[in-house]
Image (cartoon, grey):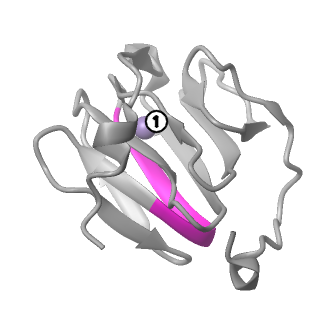
Amino acid sequence: MNTSEKQNTIFPQGEKASPDYFTGLVMFKSLVPNDATLNCQVGNVVFEPGGRNNWHTHSGGQILLVTDGIGYYQEKGNPIQVLHKGDVVVIAPNIVHWHGASHDSEFTHIAINPNTQNGIVNWLERVTDEEYNSIQK
Ligand code: MN
């Protein structure tokens, strides 16, 4: 682990995310619960190095605000993109993708899930080590 990238998290780390949908240690803290007025859910997610979510889609789309560390983002059929603090990722509805930490650094993002009346997340298969390791170094 690259200690120079040690997290200085703004929001509480929350609880361990379900191993059914995440690989490695991932912590989730709900910041804004979903409700029928705003139809928008916001959460803080902290990934340990190597931690990532399964392939998935969001029926209402998603916005990621990277607040710390170095992470990866991949849409199905495209190369892995490297994310750094300050990056913003806008994910269109129903795009198959995953996000998580890089190999050597923790990673924190705020996940904004709008249009929750259309659904929040549809979980798919796990991101294999082969897929995760496909990052061009
Ligand atoms: Mn997502």
User: Closer to the camera, 111 or 34?
Assistant: 111
| Total numbered labels placed on residues in the image | 1
In which quadrant of the rendered image does the N terminus lie? bottom right
- Please say if 61 is above or below 34: below
29 left or right of 114 in image: right
Identify the residue at image location x=44%, y=46%: 99
The amino acid sitting under disc 1 is Pro
Q: Secondary structure at mark 1?
A: strand
Name the chief secondary structure element in magenta.
strand
Q: Quadrant of ligand 1?
A: top left
Whether residue 38 can be seen here: no
Residue 98 in the image, given as x and y percentages of width and height: 38, 39
The correct choice, above or below, for 69 with respect to 75 in the image is below
Report which quarter residue 36 is drawn in: top right
Q: Residue 40 lies in magenta, yes or no?
A: no
Q: Which residue is mark 1?
A: 114
Image location of residue 55, percent across then percent down: 36, 28
| Residue stretch in magenta | 61-71
